[in-house]
Amino acid sequence: MLLEMITGKSPVDQMFEGEMNLEKWVRVSIPHQADEVVDKRFMITGSEESSADGQQQQQVDTVDSKLLLETLLVPMVDVALCCVRESPGSRISMHDALSRLKRINEKFLKSLAVSTP
């Protein structure tokens, strides 16, 4: 479920044909192509500004996007991948997953506080 939320993809998405599936696609893409795996809606950060025609546009702050990817989303994907390993015995427990997600969140919030002027 966590992989679906972060990627915005369903395991039955048409892009997954043959041997390819959501888990394999993410595994081969992380961390070098993380920006391709993560749902683009996560990457819209920064302030809204009005364009010349009066429509609202969002500016993407690349520093915030990089921070979001590196300290929050990629580590969350790593936890999700640990939860969906093929062998049930090699998967982490929900308790362990929750503990890891809490630590990731704390680290992200600390790094966000440091990067905010």
Image (spheres, rainbow, N blue to C red):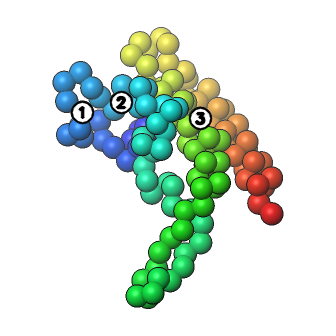
Query: Where the C terminus falls, by quadrant?
Result: bottom right
Residue plotted at (42% across, 83% down)? 55
Indicate the amino acid at tag 3.
Pro
Label 2 – label 1 distance at C-alpha: 8 Å
User: Which label number is shown at residue 75?
Assistant: 3
Say above or below: 90 vs 103. Answer: above
Front residue of 77/62: it is 62
Q: Secondary structure at mark 1?
A: loop
Say above or below: 117 vs 74. Answer: below
Dots 2, 1 in contact, CB < 8 A: yes
Where in the figure is residue 106, as x and y percent of width and height?
73, 44
* 36 to the left or right of 102: left
Dots 1, 3 in contact, CB < 8 A: no
Indicate the amino acid at tag 1.
Phe
Q: Which residue is mark 1?
A: 16
Which tag, 2 or 3, sits closer to the chain's start? Answer: 2
Residue plotted at (77% across, 48% down)? 110
User: Which label number is shown at residue 25?
Assistant: 2
* 15 to the left or right of 38: left
Using the rendered image of the protein, determine whether residue 59 is visible from the camera's viewpoint: yes
Query: Where the N terminus falls, by quadrant?
Result: top left
Residue located farthest toward the front when viewing the structure as drawn: 52
Say above or below: 80 vs 85. Answer: below
